[in-house]
Image (tube, rainbow, N blue to C red):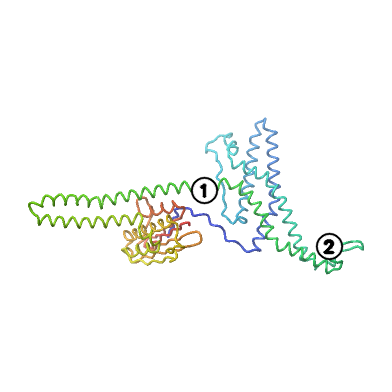
Amino acid sequence: MTAVPLATAPAPTTPAPGLARQLLRDSGYVLFGLPLALVGFVVAVAGISLTAGLLVTTLGLPVLAGTLYAARALADLERFRLPAVLRQPRVRPVYLAPAPRAGYWRRILTPVRDLQSWLDLLHAFVKLLVTLPTFVVVLVWWAVAVAGTLYVTYDWAIPRGPDDQDLSQLLGMGDGAGARVALNTSIGLFCLLTLPLVARAGARLQAGLARSLLTGVAEMRSRISTLEEQKRAAASAEASALRRLERDIHDGPQQRLVRLAMDLSRARQQLAADPEAARRTLDEAVTQTRETLDELRALSRGIAPPILVDRGLPSALAALAARALIPTELVVDDDLGTPGGRLDPALESTAYFVVAEALTNVAKHSHAGTCRVAVTRRVGRLEISVRDDGVGGAHLAKGHGLSGIADRVRAIGGALEVTSPAGGPTVVHAELPR
């Protein structure tokens, strides 16, 4: 069984872990970030200093290239740590690579000409400015939370002189052990309860800087590539729809209209000589007119079916299932047809097209006995599944109906999977963002 992905759906976020696990992740990210920041700062300062000192010689550029490669390695390590905090898939930019037969100096200059390499170096410089204060805050918060919460267990062991004053005395709470324990325990509990927020804030601050410098450009380029792909898919889908409409009009209504004109011309010639033959010819012309109207209505349903506009997606899909040549079971969320639950018109049209084209392919190629269509609203997406018990072997080659579905789905940023092993069953699964 093979699954063929057609488009990349919006990147899913990782499910949120428990509070204690997220606290440990955020704290570990902040605390271990300081050693990495120190290493990166030392590498960056030493590399730039050596480069500046050796720039008058031929050694300056190789040292600079080595510094950029070292900054890239540290940046990759930081990107590896980011998903634990941001709960997003790991993103690594595409760096410039030297040509296979490039010379020595061209290889040396390749990282120097790469914008992302300089952003990695900039991150190594400025990371310490953010990491050091967040490290201190989180570490102090942990220390106060642990020490204050457990204060009652070691208060007796703290040596005190006759002239010593506790914080509880300075605040006017008294000089007894009870006042000391109450105050310090309260402070510890406050820090313990707010520790997840403080650790999360520190981790997000560090991760935000890393994301902006280390993956921001890559994410922007990926988004641009996705939009360009969607634009090409939309143009391809529109062109395919226009070609199909032109072919259908040429093969159907146009031929009937030509025959209708010929029949009317023949009837006009027969009126004087053979009125009975003219009557029969006119009857045939009327039949041709009705059939032409039926074909035009069918074509209009494929463009913008009135039932979809007037009554919504569930009613339009029910009409499709009723007209299907294969017995079709339809499962669809009823609220998709209510005024408050209806989808965007473009999304409704795409969903209708996906089901209509999939049912057409089932009728033409699957040799199936039954078919099942399921349309379900999920959080942030609409899922469509068309399953048949046919012979399988469906594919997405150009010129087939499934390629048209792929273009439509890709045009709105959705994802399509076709699972169709030999012998069946075939499952066409689409996810449309909403």
Locate residue 117, reporting x and y percent. Answer: 60, 42
Q: Amino acid at mark 2?
A: Leu
Residue at (59, 40) in percent of width and height: 115
Residue for badge 2 = 171
Q: Looking at the picture, how far across and down is residue 126, in whole percent?
A: 68, 45
Q: Nearer the viewer, residue 414 or 2?
A: 414
Residue under the point 59% across and 42% down = 116
Circle 2 sits in a helix, a strand or a loop, which is it?
loop
Quarter occupied by residue 304: bottom left
SS under mark 1: helix
Q: In the rendered structure, which disc, 1 or 2, sits on the residue that comes first in sequence?
A: 2
Alpha-carbon span between mark 1 and mark 2: 57 Å
Q: Residue at x 45, y 63 (%)?
A: 376
- Mark carried by residue 223: 1
Q: Residue at x 29, y 57 (%)?
A: 297
Using a 10 Å C-alpha cutoff, classify the residue at mark 2 as few (fewer than 14 neighbours), some (14 to 19) or many (20 or more): few
Q: Tell me the mark number nearer the camera, choosing from 1 and 2.
A: 2
Q: Which numbered marker is on residue 182?
A: none
35, above or below 145, in the image: above
Labels 1 and 2 touching (C-beta < 8 A): no
Q: Residue furthest bottom?
A: 178
Q: Position of residue 193 (x, y in %)?
A: 70, 63
Relative height, residue 114 to residue 382 (above, below) = above
Q: Amino acid at mark 1?
A: Arg
In the foreground, 226 or 60: 226
**Residue furthest left in the image:** 273
The residue closer to the viewer here, 89 or 405, is 405
